[in-house]
Image (tube, rainbow, N blue to C red):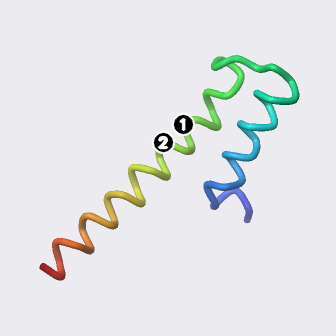
Amino acid sequence: MSGFTPVTHFVNVVRLVVLKGSGFADVKNEFGYLVMFAVALNGFAIWNYRKTS
């Protein structure tokens, strides 16, 4: 269930980079999830704003 929150993926990225010294190849899956969250949430925000204006 925690996989549906962007904070979980962000913490995983920070943990991989800071503690393990991972590169982009190691965090690309988590980064992809964060990009999908960003697109979905920003799309919803734009759609919701257009509805009220």
**Residue position for label 1:** 32
Q: Is residue 14 above or below residue 28?
A: below
State the SS at label 1.
helix
Q: Please state the horizontal and vertical placement of residue 22, each as a whole percent of the image.
A: 77, 20
Q: Quadrant of residue 34?
A: top right
Q: Is residue 38 left or right of residue 28?
A: left
State the SS at label 2.
helix
Residue at (58, 35) in percent of width and height: 31
Amino acid at dot 1:
Gly
Considering every residue shown, the one lying at the far left of the view is: 53
Residue 35 image label: 2
Q: Quadrant of residue 18?
A: top right
Q: Is residue 39 above or below residue 16?
A: below
Considering every residue shown, the one lying at the far right of the view is: 19
Quarter of the image that includes the C terminus: bottom left
Quarter of the image that includes the N terminus: bottom right
Circles 2 and 1, Cβ within 8 Å, touching? The answer is yes
Q: Residues within 10 Å of mark 2 (few under 14, many from 20)?
A: few
Q: Is residue 30 above or below residue 44?
A: above
Residue at (74, 37) in percent of width and height: 14
Q: Please state the horizontal and vertical placement of residue 15, each as a whole percent of the image.
A: 81, 37
Considering every residue shown, the one lying at the far bottom of the view is: 52
